[in-house]
Amino acid sequence: MKFNYQARTKEGEIQTGTVEAPSREAALNLLRKHGLYLTALEKIAARPIYARKIKIFQRTSRKDIVLFSRQLSIMFKSKVSLSETLRTLASQTKNPDFKEKLLTLVENVEGGTSLSQALKNYPKLFSPFYVAMVKSGEVSGNFSDVLNYLANHLEKEYHFLSKIRGAMIYPAMIVFVVLIVLALMMFFVIPNLMKLMEETQQELPFITKVVMGLSVFLKHWGWLVLAGLVGLIFLGLQYYKTSAGKKRLDRLVLRLPLIGDFLKMLYLSRFASNLSTLISGGLPIARALKITGNIIGNSVYKDIILKSQEGVRRGVPISSILEKYPQAFPAMFCQMTLVGEKTGTLDKTLMDVVSFYQKETDRRIDILLSILEPLLIIFLGLVVVGLMAAVLLPLYSMMSI
């Protein structure tokens, strides 16, 4: 919210301006901290609906959280107070949605709430992993180093995921082009060709009959096919939200050829990275395992990690539990974990594992793309050649006659 204010300085000069704060009380406190004595404070009226910006394009992104974490780490290390740091970050962010949340955090922190507790109000932005790291820094008194660990982890994860998304852009564009070509041919070119063929009444090639039949079907029943696809996707998503559905689908994707091995390396890298960061932040191993299991993203790995947590509480090493599941955790991963446990450097050993699996994941992405790209190009070529043959063959026959 924005407020217009009029105030006097300590020297008695009149000062006017605008202040942004989550509430009237927060605005009063903010201006008083700057040594101003208020004489008037009015809330600026909200804009009419037609003049407001559409908030769907102002959602806080992963990049916003990464930048916020790095800047928070740097400013806190420079001995800037937490409330002042949050206020500064709120003033410089260009995302109105994120700015509003940061101003609320400022109000909560100034009201005596710890930062970790305040972050819990935004679970969609700050995961249990994030909150646990911040709380660890608060409890241990090593807040600056913990924030640095957290910022490094989030940056690595962000760049890693960005690379994977970037690798998928080209195949997605090929599929999109194929769909556009099919739609144009089926709804515009083929119907006009059918009118021309009906006038000549000549025998059509088999491929032309197939394409014409498909065009007629899509023209009359295409809406039903589209509705069926949307319905299947909706039902699939609803089924995935159930406990049984998630377990079954998570188990299925890990068994897919090529993709399954790639996803396993992705989950292993995420598990090792999150666990290493939490341990480096000072969290007990059992608690770190619980947090990592809940954010791993796959129910198969989640169940194994939570079993490891129960074992650690009983004094059983993590490696001895993980080696019981060779399909999920390969021998090398278990051996590296065992070495880390014996030497007392589990966090550093896990980061070596992360480095290995991220390089291996990059290599698998290159292999997948090297296979996928020519296959998609061949598929697109076959589709285009087939459609052109369906159109040109009857036209060629007409010209011959």
Image: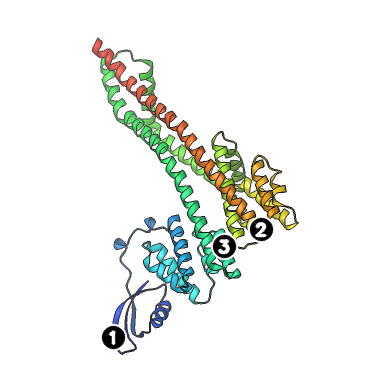
Asked which secondary structure carries label 3, the reply is helix
Residue 163 lies left or right of residue 293; in this view the side is left
The amino acid pointed to by label 1 is Ile
Mark 1 = which residue?
14
Name the mark on residue 285: 2
Residue 288 lies left or right of residue 12; in this view the side is right
Residue 120 seen: no
Q: Is residue 288 above or below residue 199?
A: below
Circles 1 and 2: CB atoms closer than 8 Å: no
The amino acid pointed to by label 2 is Ile
Asked which secondary structure carries label 2, the reply is helix
Foreground of the two, 4 or 372: 372
Between marks 3 and 2, how big is the CA–CA gap?
Answer: 13 Å
Mark 3 = which residue?
133
Earlier sequence position, callout 3 versus callout 2: 3
Q: Is residue 105 above or below residue 316?
A: below
Give residue 201's position: percent from left, percent from top.
Answer: 29, 14
Residue plotted at (27% across, 22% down): 195
Give residue 44's position: percent from left, percent from top.
Answer: 32, 74
Residue plotted at (40% across, 83% down): 32
Q: How is the image coloured?
A: rainbow
Circles 3 and 1: CB atoms closer than 8 Å: no
